[in-house]
Amino acid sequence: MEQEKRMVKGYEVVQAIEIGKVEVILAVDEQQDKPYLVCYCTRQNLLSMEQYYGAEQGSDYLKAMKDFTERIQDEVASLQQERAALPLDMPVLTANECHALTSEANLENELLAIRPERLRPEYRAAHHQLVVAIGGFGMSPHARGRAVYVRNVYSGKEQRWNRDDMLGSVKPEHIPPWAQQRIEQQQAAEKKKANQRTDAR
């Protein structure tokens, strides 16, 4: 069976590199006056839907390829800056540091580690793995839905994963001090918000 062509704005994708938070795309439509298109694709939303932006069209293949490679290099440079800004080393968490999830486990408010293989290679480190489950049917052991909405401990951003993306709950003795501190800060902020809502009634 012939594989379905991936299309962007009527252009066929011929090169695509995932790096950092984006995918850099080079697409071609020989029928156009400007047959080459370079753009970004991101899935950084709760539904993981593809969103395209930053599209540039051109008639010169070498210029399009230069744009394509420069965008990749810019993402690499951004990742290097992010890594250099980390206050300490963030080694990857493995099964040795986690309690394996059982079919009966309820994940609500659990400190979880995402499986390293479910992350892009550049994100395989503790500050991208550690999350707290805050919603979704996948938190419950017998629900049909598998989605688990989480809050990243390091960044505080909310993300969507599936239950089977989780490596397990982190053993207390392997929770990094920075993670424990951020969890306490987030809990204190949530408690303050709850008190403000109560006082406003």
Image (tube, rainbow, N blue to C red):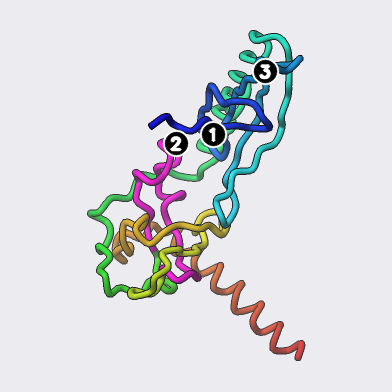
Secondary element at image label 2 = helix
Whether the residues at callouts 1 and 2 have beta carbons within 8 Å, the answer is yes
Q: Which mark is first along the chain, 3 or 2?
A: 3
132 up-or-down from 88: above or below: below
Part of the protein shown in magenta: 112-138
Q: Residue 144 in magenta?
A: no
Whether residue 112 sits left or right of residue 33 in the image: it is left
- Residue depicted at 30% across the width and 73% down the height: 105
Secondary element at image label 3 = strand
Whether residue 87 sits left or right of residue 192 in the image: it is left
Camera-side mark, 2 or 3? 3
Crowding around mark 1 (Cα neighbors within 10 Å: few <14, some 14 to 19, many 20+) is: some
- Residue closest to the far left: 96
Q: Which mark is first along the chain, 1 or 3?
A: 3
Q: Mark 3 points at which residue?
A: 36
- Residue depicted at 40% across the width and 42% down the height: 124
Q: Which mark is first along the chain, 2 or 1?
A: 1
Q: The disc labelled 2 sits on which kind of residue?
A: Glu
- Residue depicted at 49% across the width and 63% down the height: 150
Q: Name the residue under label 2.
A: 122
Residue 61 appears at what percent x and percent y? 65, 10
Residue 45 appears at what percent x and percent y? 60, 52
66 up-or-down from 4: above or below: above
Residue 35 appears at what percent x and percent y? 69, 16
Q: Residue 119 in magenta?
A: yes
Camera-side mark, 3 or 1? 3
Q: The disc labelled 1 sits on which kind of residue?
A: Leu
Picture disc at residue 79: 1
For residue 138, what is the image quadrant?
Answer: bottom left
Q: Distance between the residues labelled 3 and 1?
A: 27 Å
Whether residue 139 sits left or right of residue 56 in the image: it is left
